[in-house]
Amino acid sequence: MNLFLETLIGGLLAGTMYSLVAIGFVLIYKASGVFNFAQGSILLFAALTFVTLLEQGLPFAAALAVTILILILGAILIERTVLRPLANRSPMTLFMATLGLSYVVEGAAQGLMGAQVHALDLGIEDVPIFIGDVLISQFDLVAAATAVALALVLALLFNNTRIGISLRAVADDTRAALSIGINLNRIWQIVWAVAGIVGLVAGMLWGARQGIQFSLSLVVLKALPVLIIGGFTSIGGAIVGGLIVGAAENLAETYVGPYIGGGITPWFPYFLAIAFLYIRPAGLFGERTLERV
Amino acid sequence: MTTGDTTPHDAPSGGEPLLEVRGIEVIYDGAILAVADVSLTVAPGEIVALLGANGAGKSTTLKAISGLVVADRALVSRGEIRFRGEDITGIAPNLLAARGIVHVLEGRHVFGHLTVEENLRTGAFLRRLGRREIEHDLEEIYGYFPRLRTKRKTPAGLTSGGEQQMLAIGRALLTRPELVLLDEPSMGLAPIIVEEIFEIVTTLNRSKGTSFLVAEQNIAVSLRHAHRGYVVDSGRVALAASARELLDRGDLHEIYLGVANAVA
């Protein structure tokens, strides 16, 4: 029973890290209807910028502030040079553009800051602690708390503020939003900047765990099943999807793994995602169109 | 209900027109001609009907004026559009909304997942109002559209077609427009609701002096509430006259719209 609980809780906590990555996708998908393939590279770029600034001797807070500033400028640049010229094109065109963008961002990150692995110490002790007789990773606990806090902040931002309502309006109907004076370009800049900052947080946590390096951009591949399960349009869905994926892959690895020789975690989330596509194609919390019958 | 003979705007002879469209041509995707040659004017405080069959070029004309053609990958390739004397051809729709032109799209286009009240609020964002001013403006809109008040917490996607049309108009009014481009407000609605909506348009026009350019297939209702009308056919203005004259012709259906259209 303890093993089960430990596996479950460990999986859930690790799942919040997937959620963090997935939230960045959800934001951009909602605002511009495009699956942003570059989210992983932006995450890598953000984490790499942050750790490089730290290594240059900047204090933690200053490095964080400068990185966020760079991400905001980057969002404005991407909006001006990629999104604005391609506005009103098909989603496939936009997707291809983000595919290209991901290589540009990755190239820029490595060109400017090198390809070596950087260690990042966030000052969180990775000592397991006992809660009851269940062993829990302290680091995972901090990561989970961060994910939850971030989701709450975003929920507040998007539910009641002018920017939040505008974003949801744009997500519902871009043309109508334009017709009443909502500045689409500004909304895109804000959303890409926020997605970049979410990527930074995710990149810092992932980076602290496995080092900041090229492979960090591949967390995209972890986010995809999370999005399919949770739905592409819901931040809450990204959280729940992450939890499901984290718990399911951990349980599968522990209980099914020994019978088939282990190594389940890379593919099991996809197996689950395909099952979800059969049953609930819009995901658990994905928006279906609201219509009176 | 006959407004044609009670208002002074029948002939916008003296003053500068609020909107002046001169010989515009609109092309989609660089190849498809949707509007070949449309010229029209709207005077301050005037209600103008833009009549024509499906595909005649009414919606495209409105989109050319509001700037939304760009979102459909179309272009005003010839002619010019002037608003208060200034050339506005090709200006982005959100900037035109700030200048006083708002477009209520065909098919309503409310934000389905937002509540009725959130929909209305989005209309006021443009003016960066304080909380109290927004509340005041919302109350004013609820005054015109009492049905919306009872549905304020309902997601707009779950309200009826008539309510959505009212919401789309109310949302547009919160931008404090001088000119409202209203595209096919009667579409899919029961005659009694259509009448109600046109009554409100007339009321708004009288009490606030807001100008309306209304694209419609429903000739009878729109001309009863308009001052003047234009008939477009195959992307050109085929006829321009006062609402009274157009109504008196009695043969508009046969000539331009086909006899199948219901007379409301």
Image (cartoon, rainbow, N blue to C red):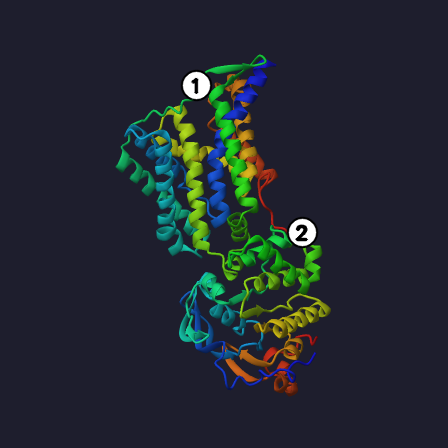
Left or right? Give the position of A64 relative to A132: left
**What chain does mark 1 sit on?**
A
Left or right? Give the position of A259 relative to B7: left
Residue A122 vs A168, above or below: the answer is above
- Please tell me which residue is depicted at 70% across the width and 69% down the height of the picture: B196
Left or right? Give the position of B94 relative to A41: right
Query: Residue A31: horizontal and vertical position, in percent?
Result: 49, 49
The quarter in which the C terminus of chain B is drawn is bottom right
Mark yes or no: residue A270 visible.
no
Residue A87 vs B91, above or below: the answer is above
Query: Residue A102: horizontal and vertical position, in percent?
Result: 36, 41
Identify the image quadrant of residue B168.
bottom right
Left or right? Give the position of A288 relative to B37: right
Q: Secondary structure at mark 2?
A: loop
Q: Which residue is mark 2?
A: B154
The quarter in which the N terminus of chain B is drawn is bottom right
Are the residues tagged 2 and 1 within 8 Å (C-beta)?
Answer: no
Residue type (three-letter) at the residue carrying disc 1: Glu
Q: Are marks 2 and 1 on the same chain?
A: no
Q: Which residue is mark 1?
A: A125
Residue type (three-letter) at the residue carrying disc 2: Thr
**Label 2, residues with CA under 10 Å away: few <14, some 14-19, many ≥20:** some
Residue sitting nearer the eye, B26 or B87: B87
- Please tell me which residue is depicted at 65% across the width and 59% down the height of the picture: B139
Mark yes or no: residue A52 visible.
yes
